[in-house]
Image (tube, rainbow, N blue to C red):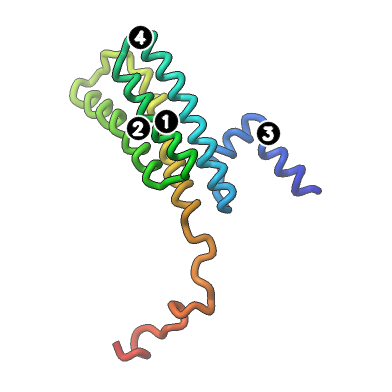
Amino acid sequence: MLKDVIELQQNSGLHGVLNRHFGRIDTPEHALMAVRSIAKAFLWLTVVAAIAGLILARPTTIIDAIIWAGLGLWLLRRQSRVAACLLLVVVVIPLISWALFFVSHSFYPFGGGNIFIQIAITAMAWRAAYATFRYHGNWKGLQPDSPAQEMPVGRETGI
């Protein structure tokens, strides 16, 4: 009963949102929950980016939204490591280009406010990649009775 109360407190309010998106991933269920919540967040970002692209008449924003939607759906449906890594690459490339432009020109003529959103999106993509690798990873590790741990190493084997 006390464990349920503690879990309910950890999953409520702003602390719950932060815990779900950036908390520890201890079990495959936590990993699956993190992947799904981040994929849903990317789908919402897709909607916002598509609307902004239509209002501002920016075709590159609409193309980004289409790519994010495809990768977000792939991530939501299959929990694919490939989709998470591609999403991370797609999100990091504009961040790197912004940094290179900033270093080479020492100012950003377009306002520069978008960099904070880009950093947050990159953190979410990193978390999605981490969660997918944790979801598909080996949770138990090597068992004590496995042959890999019982094999003698070094002088005992004569190798």
Looking at the picture, which amino acid does disc 4 mark?
Leu
- Could you tell me if the residues under marks 1 and 2 are in contact, i.e. CB atoms within 8 Å? yes
Q: Which of marks 3 and 1 is nearer the N terminus?
A: 3
Distance in Å between CA atoms under marks 2 and 3: 29 Å
Residue 50's x, y, as percent?
40, 18
Q: Which residue corresponds to the image point at 37% horizontal and 83% vertical from the top-left?
A: 153
Q: Which of marks 2 and 3 is nearer the N terminus?
A: 3
Q: Which residue corresponds to the image point at 55% horizontal and 49% vertical from the top-left?
A: 25
Q: Quarter of the image for the C terminus: give it.
A: bottom left
Residue 77's x, y, as percent?
49, 40
Secondary structure under the numbered disc 3 in the rendered image: loop
Q: Earlier in the sequence, mark 1 or mark 2?
A: 2
Looking at the picture, which amino acid does disc 2 mark?
Val
Of tags 2 and 3, which is closer to the observer? Answer: 2
- Could you tell me if the residues under marks 1 and 4 are in contact, i.e. CB atoms within 8 Å? no
Secondary structure under the numbered disc 2 in the rendered image: helix
Rendered image: mark on residue 121: 1
Distance in Å between CA atoms under marks 1 and 2: 7 Å
- Could you tell me if the residues under marks 4 and 3 are in contact, i.e. CB atoms within 8 Å? no
Residue named by callout 4: 56
Q: Which of marks 1 and 4 is nearer the N terminus?
A: 4
Residue named by callout 2: 91
